[in-house]
């Protein structure tokens, strides 16, 4: 049935004239002594006509779990089909997402209302978007989503779990400034456990992009105030939220660029309190630019503070050796929360290692990394792993 749907969607628009076809593949594999069977395969295709396009993306992902390092089971198949039609100022975009959880050990989900635990087996999610340019600077948008989730209890009963979401709004764009107002309504329902929950949100957002700036300097900023309706899992009213974000991009010299983003989130429910603050920065330095493959060094870091603490910093380097052959070097440090018994509230991880890459022009790329990871679980753990991948893009074909 799944294959038949894709064939029908693929063949219908192919009856039109002047069609182009693009396809791609991205395959990654690897493993270590703790997780010997990690891998991911992405396959995609783009069929495009004069005023329409069809994108099909298929992903197979597998990640297991062990007693030493428990992970959320992440073995699934996901198919996204996205169809876009443009007719003058109107854009209609139906799409569907189909996910199936694979393997015998299904991911667990704790149910609300002390209804126990259910096992996730997948979902299907159709959606429909509509965008209209109603005037030169005014843009109207709307989107509807529906989830039918396959959740089963231990006794095999289907929870009949569904979710619905409707959103829409209006934006006004002027040179350097955009004002938008939008609303969202979401409902979750499960007949078997007699559960129903709804919440809503109304956003007023203002974004700016200054036009008069020095050369090679880019700044954007936006602020959003969100009015929430509904309650959380404790039965308390959801707090309103104010979000502000500013991003700086600066090319210091042609070979050196800096990209930094600051974000702050404040909640208000009678009391003003900070919900999250974060800063993220990336510095890119390019050298040996006369070669077919430019060498580069990327320094990156992110720090966030909310109810949890996360920190991340690292460096990645690609050094071209000869033609398409390059040396890869990476090092990363990360602090994240953990639920591993005896490991404490935060887990520190350090990953570093070398690798090789070969690029066949713009058609294909093959790479491999040999990494060591050190982390503090119940005790300090230290292990090696191998990761490798193949990316393939045959180009665009017209017929």
Image: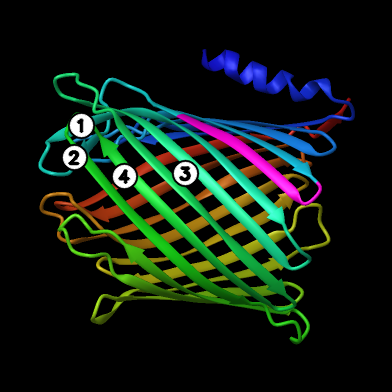
Name the residue that disc number 2 marks: 111
For marks 3 and 1 on the same chain, the one whose residue lies earlier in the sequence: 1
Whether residues under marks 2 and 3 lie with C-beta atoms below 8 angstroms apart, the answer is no
For marks 4 and 1 on the same chain, the one whose residue lies earlier in the sequence: 1
Name the residue that disc number 3 marks: 370
For marks 3 and 1, give the one nearer the viewer: 1
Residue lying at the far front of the rendered structure? 134
Whether residues under marks 2 and 1 lie with C-beta atoms below 8 angstroms apart, the answer is yes
- Residue 248 in sight in this render: no
Name the residue that disc number 4 marks: 383
Residue 217's place in the image compared with 390, above or below, is below
Tell me where residue 341 appears, x and y as whole percent: 12, 50
For marks 4 and 2 on the same chain, the one whose residue lies earlier in the sequence: 2
Quadrant location of residue 123? Answer: top left
**How far separated are the C-alphas under marks 4 and 2?**
36 Å
**How far separated are the C-alphas under marks 2 and 3?**
40 Å
For marks 4 and 1, give the one nearer the viewer: 1
For marks 2 and 3, give the one nearer the viewer: 2
For marks 2 and 1 on the same chain, the one whose residue lies earlier in the sequence: 2
Task: Please name the predominant secondary structure of the magenta segment in the image.
Answer: strand
State the quadrant of the C terminus: top right
Whether residues under marks 3 and 4 lie with C-beta atoms below 8 angstroms apart, the answer is no
**How far separated are the C-alphas under marks 3 and 1?**
38 Å
Tell me where residue 267 appears, x and y as whole percent: 31, 75
Name the residue that disc number 1 marks: 118
The magenta stretch is 88-98
For marks 2 and 3 on the same chain, the one whose residue lies earlier in the sequence: 2
Q: Secondary structure at mark 1?
A: strand
For marks 3 and 4 on the same chain, the one whose residue lies earlier in the sequence: 3
- Residue 365 in sight in this render: yes
The residue located at (78%, 46%) in the rendering is 323
């Amino acid at each position: 049935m799944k294959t038949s749907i894709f064939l029908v969607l693929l063949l219908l628009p192919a009856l039109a004239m002047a069609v182009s076809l693009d396809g791609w593949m991205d395959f990654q594999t690897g493993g270590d002594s703790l997780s010997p069977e990690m891998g991911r395969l992405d396959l995609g295709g783009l069929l495009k006509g004069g005023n329409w396009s069809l994108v099909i993306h298929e992903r197979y992902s597998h990640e297991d779990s062990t007693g030493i390092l428990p992970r959320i089971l992440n073995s699934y198949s996901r198919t996204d089909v996205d169809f876009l039609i443009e007719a003058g100022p109107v854009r209609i975009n139906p799409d569907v997402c189909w996910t199936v959880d694979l393997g015998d050990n299904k991911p667990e989900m704790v149910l609300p209302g002390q209804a126990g635990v259910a096992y996730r087996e997948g979902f299907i999610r159709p959606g429909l978007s509509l965008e209209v340019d109603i005037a030169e600077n005014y843009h109207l948008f709307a989107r509807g989503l529906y989830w039918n989730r396959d959740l089963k209890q231990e006794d095999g009963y289907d929870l009949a779990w569904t979710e619905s979401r409707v959103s829409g709004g209006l934006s006004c764009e002027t040179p350097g400034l955009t004002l938008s107002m939008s609303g969202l309504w979401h409902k979750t329902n499960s007949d078997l456990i007699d559960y129903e929950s709804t919440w809503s949100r109304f956003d007023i957002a203002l974004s700016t992009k200054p036009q008069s700036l020095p050369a090679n300097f880019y700044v954007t900023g936006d602020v959003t105030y969100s009015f929430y309706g509904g309650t959380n899992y404790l039965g308390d009213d959801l707090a309103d939220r104010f979000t502000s974000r500013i991003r700086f991009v600066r090319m210091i010299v042609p070979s050196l660029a800096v990209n930094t983003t600051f974000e702050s989130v404040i909640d208000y429910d009678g009391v003003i309190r900070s919900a999250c603050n974060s800063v993220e920065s990336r510095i890119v330095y390019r050298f040996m630019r006369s070669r077919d493959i430019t060498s580069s060094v990327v320094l990156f870091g992110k720090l966030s503070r909310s109810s949890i603490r996360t920190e991340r910093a690292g460096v990645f380097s690609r050094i071209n050796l000869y033609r398409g052959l390059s040396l890869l070097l990476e090092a990363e440090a990360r602090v994240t929360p953990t639920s591993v018994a005896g490991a404490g509230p935060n887990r520190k991880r350090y990953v570093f290692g070398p690798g090789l890459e070969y690029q066949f022009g713009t058609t294909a790329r093959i790479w491999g990394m040999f990494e060591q990871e050190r982390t503090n679980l119940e005790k300090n753990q230290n292990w090696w792993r191998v990761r490798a991948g193949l990316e393939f893009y045959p180009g665009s074909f017209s017929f």
